[in-house]
Each structure stands twice: as C-alpha cells, then as structure tokens.
Amino acid sequence: MNQYKIALVGNPNVGKTSLFNKLTNLRQKVGNYPGVTVEKREGNIERNGNKFSITDLPGTYSIYPSSLDEEIVFKILGDKSNQLYPDLAVVIGEPSNLKRSILLYQQVRDLEVPAIFVINMKDEIESKGLTIDLKKLEELLETKIYLTNARTSDGLNELIDALTKSAQVYQSKFTLPTEHSASVNKIKETFEITNDYTAWQYLSQKQMPFLTKEDQTKVDAIKKEFNIVPRRLQVKETLDRNTFLEKKLESIVSYNFKNNETFTDKVDKLLIHPIFGYIIFLAVLLLIFQAVYTWSGPLMTMVEDLFAWLDEKAISMIPAGPINDIIGGAIIPGIEGIAVFVPQIAILFLFISIMEETGYMSRVVYLMDRWLKPFGLSGKSVVPLISGVACAVPAIMSARNIENDKERLLTILVTPFMTCSARLPIYIVLIALVIPDEKILGLSYQALALFIMYILGVVGALGSAILLNIVIKAKHKSYLILEMPTYKLPDWKNVAINVWEKTLGFLIDAGKIILAISIILWVLGTFGPGEQFKNAEEIVTAHHPKMSEEDLANEIASYKLEHSYLGKLGTVIEPIVEPLGYDWKMGIGLISSFAAREVFVGTMSTVYSLGEVDVEDDAQKNSLLHRMKTEINQNTGEPAYNLATGVSLLLFYAFAMQCMSTIAIVKRETNSWKWTLLQTGFMTGIAYLVAFIAYHLLK
C-alpha cells in the first residue's frame, strides 16, 4: 500500500477545516504540536490501495509568521527534514479573495513544496458575481485547479484522486531583487543552498526555527554584514508579488458585482453598527451567559445525582474498609468534580462554534478589538472574559480561538479574576455576615456590595492585563487582519466535532490533575496523627453525653477535621493568615476551598459542627450565619467575622486563585507549569496584599 503525507494549507475562513472533516470522514485525532499549545489535527483515509495521512495546518496569510499558529506552518513547509513535511500540499482558496490565496500558493511552490490549488465554496462564484477563467488560472499557477464545496462534498472524489498524482513542474515566480543578490549568494555559499527563494528565507525570516544555534549565528552575522532588516524584505516581496498578481489576474478574474445589496451587507449594517452592534453583541453574550450559567444547571444536577447514586452503590457493594473509603470519599467525588463541568464546557463551545461557523465571530473581533487592545488583549478575548463570569474552566478553553500567542496567554492569565459562579456562595454568606441589611436611595447595601464584587473582578482582570502586557514580551507583533466571511448556516457536523473535541480534551488532560488533587485533599481531611484523631468519637461522646445523634455526628466530624492533617495545616498556616484577621479555622477553609471555592462554606459548616449547609435554604443559612456571628477569634478576642475580617475575606476570594480545576486547565492550555505557577502566585499575592490593607484599614 502506497502512503502519502498531505498538508492542507490556506488562509483563515476558506473552509479548510470543513474540507478536512469531509476528507477524513471524522477519522481524525487532535493533539498539540510538540512543545506548543497550537492544536494539531490529523486524519487518515484509504482509497484505491493508497493510504493518506492528512494534516490540517493552522490558517495563515503567508509563510511569514505573525503568530504561533503561522510559525508552525513555516516550520513544516520550510524544513524538508520535518516529519510532517508533505508529499503534497493542498493550498485552499475561496472565490472572493483569490489573490491572497494565490500569493500563499506561490510562496509554497517557491519553497519547492509540491502543491496543488483548490477553490473551495465553488457555489459562491456565481452568487458573488464572479467570473473565473480556469484555463488561464491553471496556466498562471502551473497546476490543475480543483473546485470543491466542502459543505456538500461536491468535488471531493476528484480531489482525493489527485492526491496520488505528482505535482506539475513549477517555474518560480520569485524575482531576486538586485540589491540583495550579494547577501543571498553569501547564504547559498555558506549553507550550500541552490534555491534563491530558500536562501531569501534565511534573510527575510526573523529567525529560522529549525536551524541550530551555531547556524543561526552565521545567518545573523550575514544579516549584520549586509544591513539586512527582515521586515523590509518581507514587505518588499509581498508588494512585488501583489503587483505581479494584480496585472495577471485582471484578465482571469472578473468581479461583476451586482448593484443589489447582498444579505451579508444588509445584516452587517446592523451587526457592526457603532451603537446597535454593541447592543446586539451584549444580548448574545447575555444569552451565552444565561445558557452556561442557567441552562447547564439541570444537566449538572443530573451529573451530581448520577455520581451520588454511584457513590451509594459503591459503598453498598464494597466491604467497609480503606478501599471503600477511598472510592466513595475520594475517587468518585473526584471524577464528579471533573464531569460536573462538562455541561458548561459543551454549551459554551456550542455557542462559540456556531458564532464561528455563521461568520459572526469575525464581527465580534472587529467590534471589541479597539476596546481591548490597550490592555494587550484581542477582540476575541471578550468571549473568555465574559464567560469567566459563569466558570473560568470553559472560559479559558475558549481562548484557543485567539491566534496571537501573547494575547492568548494574557487572556488565560487574567480570566480567573472574573467573578465566577463558584464565588457566589462565599459572597452570599460573608456579605450577609458583615454588611448591614439596610438601604440607601432604595438600593440594598448588600446588593451594592455584591455588585462591587463583580466590578472588582473586571478591574482585577483588566488591571492585571496592563501589568502583564508590560512584563510578557511578544514573539510576534499583533495585527488585526480580518476576513469578513459571508453569513451562512452552520455546518452542524463541524460544530459537533468541535464541541466533542474540546469537552473530551478537558476530561482527559485537565481531569488527571483535578482527580489527583481531589484525592490529596481527601486524604488530608480524612486522616490525622495522634490519639485525638484516632479516638475522636470516644472523646466527643464523653464530653457531650446528652447530645442528639445528629448533633453528635456533626460534633465528631468537626473534631476529626480539627485534628486531621488538614486541620494541622490550618494551624501551621495560621501565622501567615493571622495578619489578614483569620484564625486557624478560616485557614482550614482556605486550604479546603482549593478543591473549589464554594467548599469554603461547607468546610466552615463542618468546623462549626453544623453538618451540610445549603446557602439557598434560608433556615440552614441563618443557622450558619448565627454560629459564625457568635464565633470569637482566639487571637484577637474579638468576633471572628467583623467588618474588617469579612471584607478581608471577600477581597481575598475576589482575587485569589482558589480553584484546582482552573489551575489544571491553565496548565493544559499553556502547556507550562511555569506560567501556571506564576499565575497562581501572582493572583494569591495580589489577594493577600489587598486583604491585608483592607483588614488593617477597617479594624
């Protein structure tokens, strides 16, 4: 069986991924390119005794990288020793902007990569009023041109048959500028290169990613000797190619635009209107937020109920002992802590995929880019930031849509500042404890306090973005290059694939970290040193002989938690949290809430011998509030939850990274423990500083 490596190359929004999905018929795998977070999609098909390994390369406008995604394309096509270097590159264009796709095709061919040219969305040739002389275009490109429609599979069989054919001989269209002939010849001599355009790349690329440090040093020396500025060479080449193509395409492509406005033109008058465009976008975001925050509720409840049933079955089927305890107390709850996010992730990516498939996402970027650019963010950052108000986990995953690596990293690092739904139980309890239940001008103090907490999330995200934008250096400059695709109905198969891949990726990659931390926290809270923990039941029963069975069970649980390893850790960190107004009991709450922020409320309930508390149940909430109000801080002799301590806790949870799921997904998306730990330390440091200042100002 003959084997062929095929690479799909093309500008963004030409339907390349749709074509890939049709060619592979969903037989594909998704991962990351080695060492980076750029997604790699590969698929295998067999036809007529031939096996094709197809790689869907990231979208790019040229072989000169302006983002990490585009850098991957040059690494593969510019290096014949790369394991993904193709036997054939399929360069894909679309009718409305052929010149840009042809320019990319010529660069690929000038690199001596065998290639063919495909015009996708062929149904739009007539609908957009285009006339293309295919014979002349084939003569210009020196290849047969294939017309396809990925949405209907039209032309796919002919394209697959072409994958086994040798690419036609190609006469380079690159003309070496006279003023750079000496430097190019020096490169050719030094590295024994015969192709002018390959040598040109050594000079025009900022760096050659596949060269050794020694060889790159030689290239840099030649650049310095001839005063070469790579960016100028890139601009020179692009201008020359465009001038050449404009003349050639005049007699090949005719744009017979009709006088009538298209459907896209009419809709854009509304969707990118300077006023109504933002109103509509806010409405769309409200719908997304409502879906992620509310619609997922019943599904998350179903997940919780399912795991509660599994927990009960496991406990009843497995004999009492260590295995029963760890399965029922750590493994099943740990897996539940992963699976419970699936509805939110799936719903969020459903909306994002629909926005991309319909063409609306490009309009979102256009609207928001001018507002977020001063903070070092992208127009696409608005979706993760707003989604972070529901949950940071799917929000951070949605940052994959940001091509520029610095903007993507910044978005990932600042999104957890947004006030997520997990903080609400803490806010509800603490605000009720320390903020008077009074009104001013008809507005509740407590409602205003909750509103301020959400505003602080936005301030924290944008403020930290300003700081990080200064610290983090960009490898590539960011330019807003937008293709406004025509509006179309989504390809539901593409949508389904995208949702499935994102959800599965979270379950497998981030899930491993979440499960491991869940088990560690369970062990710390379930076991303890010494006789006090071992004999907790006897000690508590002796001190409270007349206590009811339920109250006694709660008291025993509280006593065991106090003397567990987790309780000991709370005591150990007390000197660290004491300057914030906290005691060791609050320290236990801080450590345990690392599993999930909302666990703080449940831990405090256990510490104060109240058992499980539902903050939405008024009676249970009031019972917890009463117990917390009467608690005395042994370090100060004052009420543990006064205004100073309450505000300190509110601010700490507003800014701290108190969520293992978020940490796990940041590690997965950045592929770096360095950035993950820096983010955790940065957020915790800000939280500590702000909480410290607030406590000492108010006490």
Image (cartoon, rainbow, N blue to C red):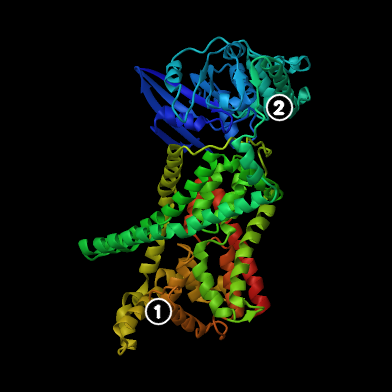
Quadrant of image for the C terminus: bottom right
Identify residue type, mark 2: Asp
Check residue 357 in the rendering and tell me which mark sits there, or answer none. Answer: none
Q: Circle 2 — which element?
A: helix
Residue 650 higher or lower than 180, as above or below: below
Is 495 positioned to the left or the right of 65 in the image? left
Identify residue type, mark 1: Leu
Judge whether residue 678 can be spotted in this image: no
Q: Position of residue 219 (x, y in %)?
A: 68, 24
Identify which residue, 270 or 248, lies in the foreground.
Answer: 270
Q: Circle 1 — which element?
A: loop
Residue 434 higher or lower than 85, as above or below: below
| Residue 239 picture quarter | top right
Identify which residue, 314 or 544, lies in the foreground.
Answer: 314
Residue 613 higher or lower than 31, as above or below: below
Q: Position of residue 589 (x, y in %)?
A: 48, 71
The answer to whether the residues at label 1 and label 2 have Cβ atoms under 8 Å apart is: no
| Residue 526 picture quarter | bottom left
Per the image, the residue denoted by label 1 is 610
Q: Position of residue 324 (x, y in %)?
A: 26, 62
Of marks 1 and 2, which one's residue comes earlier in the chain? 2
Q: Please, which residue is most extreme toward the front here?
A: 260
Is 372 positioned to the left or the right of 625 in the image? right
Per the image, the residue denoted by label 2 is 220
Judge whether residue 218 can be spotted in this image: yes
Q: Position of residue 227 (x, y in %)?
A: 78, 25
Residue 538 higher or lower than 184, as above or below: below
Categorize mark 1 by other alpha carbons within 10 Å: few (<14), some (14-19), many (20+): many
Instruction: Name the residue rendered at 39%, 30% in the picture.
Output: 25
Mark 1–mark 2 Cα distance, whole angstroms, equals 69 Å
| Residue 247 picture quarter | top right
Quadrant of image for the N terminus: top left
